[in-house]
Amino acid sequence: MDIELMLKVYPFFLKAAWITILLSVLTAGLGLICGILGASARLSRFSIVRFLGAAYVSVFRGTPALIQLFILYFGGPQIGIQLDAFEAGVIGLGINAGAYMTETIRGGIISIDRGQREAARTLGLSRWQTTYKVILPQAARLLVRPLGVNLNMLIKATALVAAISVIELTYTAQRYIGSTYKPFEMFLLAGVLYMIIIYATGRGVAWLDRKVRIN
């Protein structure tokens, strides 16, 4: 193993790791927004809205995220959508992650005992007030760990954007393999940095889970 080479290229991998972190944060934020909207649609009283929510989940969970990225980045210009690689990566992965988060959030909401809704309505709360003042605060406590799992999966999925030339960890490893012919060292370095990011994320999720359960 060429330790000297790994130490030499480490600063470049560290810079790429920050790109991976930024990509993960932005993608997770978009995914959460899409997940909330998708779960709201799936739980709507209106059949057409429920259909649209189900269609969103089926399409984006039923097709590979890499194909979705290719359609957005390479096919987008044909229909007037011009995005750079980073923007396409954030939007593509964010919408894909949102489909998974939709089902996670919906599962958390419907897991709340129906008696809670009935009690709230008995007290005179509207459907909207019942959802946002009674159901969601309870569901939020149950959703931290499942959404944390979604986040870890999303961080790993950011490696896919290397295929559209976003300069994150995987792309950086591939680029240096081309000049050093040392795939073991380059992928090992990238893998260690991914592991550190995911471990730190896991610890943060565990801390947040403890906080919401205490409160």
Image: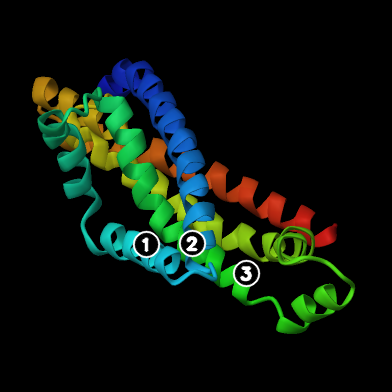
- Amino acid under disc 2: Ala
Q: Give the residue at x 41% y 35%.
A: 193
Residue depicted at x 33% and y 47%: 157
Q: Nearer the viewer, residue 138 or 187?
A: 138
Of the two numbered discs 3 and 1 in the rendering, the one whose residue sits closer to the viewer: 1
Q: Taking 100 as reference, is 86 above or below it? A: above
Q: Nearer the viewer, mark 2 or mark 3?
A: 2
Residue positioned 60% across, 69% down in the render: 108
Quadrant occupied by the C terminus: bottom right
> Which quadrant holds the N terminus?
top left
Q: Mark 2 sits on what residue?
A: 41
Q: Residues within 10 Å of mark 3 (few under 14, many from 20)?
A: many
Q: Secondary structure at mark 1?
A: helix
Sooner in the amino-acid sequence: mark 1 or mark 2 = 2
Determine which of the numbered discs, if any, sits on residue 52 in the image.
Answer: 1
Q: Amino acid at mark 3?
A: Ile
C-alpha distance separating marks 2 and 3: 13 Å
Residue 10 place in picture, x, y as percent: 35, 21
How far is the residue under mark 1 from the one under mark 2? 7 Å
Proximity of marks 1 and 2: CB atoms separated by less than 8 Å: yes
Q: Identify whether 59 is placed above or below 188.
A: below
Where residue 51 sits, quadrant-wise, is bottom left
Q: Dot 2 lies on which element? A: helix
Query: Residue 109's mark?
Result: 3
* Residue neighbourhood size for the residue with mark 2, other residues' Cα within 10 Å, grouped as few (<14), some (14–19), many (≥20): many
The local crowd at label 1, few if under 14, some if 14 to 19, many if 20 or more residues have their Cα within 10 Å, is some
For residue 7, the mark is none
Q: In this view of the protein, which residue sits in the foreground, 173 or 168?
A: 168
**Residue 122 at x, y percent in the picture:** 86, 78
Q: Amino acid at mark 1?
A: Leu
Say whether residue 189 is visible.
no
Q: First in sequence: mark 2 or mark 3?
A: 2
